[in-house]
Amino acid sequence: MIRLLALLLLLPQLALAEGWPRHFPHKFGETVLEAPPTRIASLDFGGGDDLLALGVQPVTLRLWTGEGQLGVGPWAEDLLTSQPVLLRGAPDFERIAAARPDVILAFWSGITEADYAKLSRIAPVIATPAGMGDFDLPWQARARLAARALGREAEAEARISALQDRLRSLAARHPEWAGKTASIAFDWDGTPGAFLPGDVRVRPLAQLGFTTPAALTALAAPGAFSVSLSPEDLGPLEADLILWVGSASPPNQPMRRFLAARRDGREIVASAELSAALSWSSLLSLPRALDLLVPQIEAALPPDRSLP
């Protein structure tokens, strides 16, 4: 997995020099695109963002969380000028076929091998790269893979570079964040927990200098992207900063009041838009996530604040 991730993240120039046809090896085999497609069906959660950022109107969108009536987040609504087929839940093969796609992008979708076989009867399908989990691809790799399928690598590299520069600039402006711990917590139907390193919500904070508390990583099962906790013991969440995502209202966790981060004002409850923007972690949503999150971190962790 490490070698594949390095290829996806560190060799963008190879894709820039590549012609057609193009080969896309993945967990279910290999897909070949003979020429740049024009009708692109997205089955990826939040996948429409990267397409819109690259100047492409998708013919299908997969609904997830945080979408408005148009099927995209508020950060992308101005770019959506078409009326794609809106999909929710398991792939609806008939509606996808009716959209007449040239290619189906499904590398952050969770489709099964049986789904892949059915979808391949409709159009070529690009699935998750071999050796990676369904939702392991970082935002840079997802954008580059979509761009390679569309023949729009230059546009993707410009967007990626601008966002990377912004993250580096923010980290440089806040050297006090380097090495601080941050827990990205959730409350799913009364069950608390936190996301682990490698999850899309954690990666942007890692690029800003934050690390995940050792007490959380110690609880991680192999390959897990999150860990559940007992409502009676939220101690593993304790960190220099706690960010609750997934609900615009404070989590209903009685033991939360005993967390030092909460008592000291170092706790942030994300708005619905911030939660969705971090969860999508796309070329369009991440800039909005930073707009919303950075001022709240600055307020919670001022440079002159001493921590216990």
Image: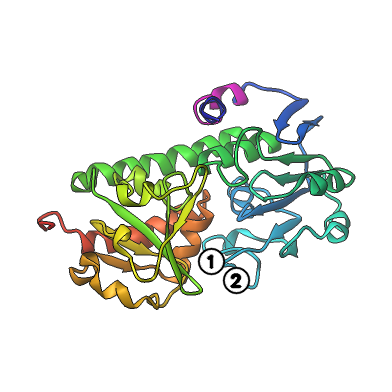
Q: Residue 31 lies in what quarter of the image?
A: top right
- The quadrant of the image that shows the C terminus is bottom left
Note whether 255 is above or below 31 in the view shown. below
Looking at the picture, which amino acid does disc 1 mark? Pro
Which quadrant is home to the N terminus? top right
Q: Do the residues labelled 1 and 2 touch (CB within 8 Å)?
A: yes
Q: Closest to the observer: 38 or 172?
A: 172
Give the residue displayed 76% in from the left and 25% down from the top: 20
* Mark 1: few/some/many CA within 10 Å (<14, 14-19, 20+): some
Q: Where is residue 127 in the image (x, y as percent from the top left)?
A: 71, 40
Q: Where is residue 303 in the image (x, y as percent from the top left)?
A: 14, 54
Q: Is residue 186 above or below residue 157?
A: below
Q: Is residue 12 above or below residue 223?
A: above
Q: Which residue is drawn at 20% across and 66% down?
A: 260
Residue 94: image quadrant is bottom right
Q: What residue type is labelled 2?
A: Gly
- Residue wearing tag 2: 68
Q: Can residue 278 be seen in this view?
A: yes
The magenta region covers: 8-15
The mark nearer the N terminus, 1 or 2, is 2
Query: In screen coordinates, is 25 left or right of 245?
Result: right
The residue identified by callout 1 is 74
State the SS at label 1.
loop
Q: Is residue 295 visible?
A: no
Q: How far apart are marks 1 and 2 (CA)?
A: 7 Å
User: What secondary structure predominates along the stretch shown in magenta?
Assistant: helix
Residues 45 and 287: in front is 45
Instruction: Tell me residue 105's x, y (percent).
Output: 72, 45
SS state under label 2: loop
Q: Position of residue 222 (x, y in %)?
A: 50, 42
Q: Is residue 82 left or right of residue 143?
A: right
